[in-house]
Image (cartoon, rainbow, N blue to C red):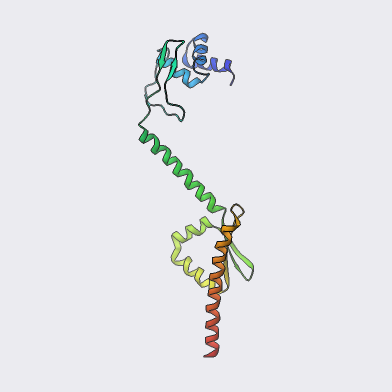
Amino acid sequence: MDKLNLVDKLKENADISYEEAKFALENNNWDILEAMIYLENIGKVKKPEVSEFYTNTYKGTYDNTSAGHVVESVNYKEKKSYYSKNDFEGFFEAVCKVIDTGNNIFLEVSRKSRALIKLPITVIILLLIFAFWFIIPLMIIGLFFEIEFSISSKRFSSDKIDRINKIFKELSIGAQDIVDKIKKGINNG
C-alpha cells in the first residue's frame, strides 16, 4: 500500500485531519498500527474498551522526540501465558508435521514379489492403536505364508529405509526357516 493510501486509511479510521495522519505515520515508520497507538496515547483517538493487544513484533518503547512524547508499548499478558500460547501452536505444528511425514512413508505388503497393498505409516499406526489385537497376529501369521513387508518413501534417505527393510527381510527369512523346519519335521515324522 502506498503512503498516500495509508494516510487516507488512517485519516478515515481515526477521524483526524490529513496532516495529523501523515505526521503520525511519518513518526511511526509508516506502520498504521503503531500510528494508531501513537494517536491513542496522545489523546487524538479514543482507546478501545479492551486494554489487551497481541503481537509477535517488537514490544519495546518508542521515543518520538519530534512530537515531545514518549510512547510506551502496551503491557501484554505475562510472558508465561504468551509463551504457553506459542508452545501450543508449536505443538500443533509439530503434530501436523509428524502426520505429514507418516503420510509420505509407506508400508508395502507383498507376496512372491507381487505387491498386495501399500498403506501410509499413519494408517498402520492408527490400526495398531485401535486394532492391535488383530493387526499384530495377522502380520506374524503373514510372515509364515511368505508375506513380505517393506518400507518405501521418496522423501527420506535410502539409508534409514534400507536398515528397516533389512530388519523386515531378516524377520521374513527367520519365519521361512521356521516353516521349513516344521515341513521337514512333518515329512520325517
180 w.r.t. 167: above or below: below
Q: How many marks are shown on the rendered structure?
A: 0
The percent coordinates of residue 175 (x first, y second) are 53, 74
The quarter of the picture where the N terminus appears is top right
Q: Which sits in the foreground, 152 or 164? A: 164
The residue under the point 55% across, 83% down is 183
120 w.r.t. 174: above or below: above
Quarter residue 115 falls in: bottom right
The residue under the point 55% across, 88% down is 187
The residue under the point 42% across, 41% down is 88
Quarter residue 49 falls in: top left
Q: Which sits in the foreground, 108 or 161? A: 161
Quarter residue 54 falls in: top left
The percent coordinates of residue 104 (x first, y second) are 57, 53
Task: Single out the residue that lies furthest toward the right.
Answer: 113
The percent coordinates of residue 26 (x first, y second) are 52, 14
160 w.r.t. 77: above or below: below
Q: Is residue 168 left or right of residue 82?
A: right
Q: Is residue 46 left or right of residue 140?
A: left
Task: Single out the residue that lies furthest toward the bottom.
Answer: 189
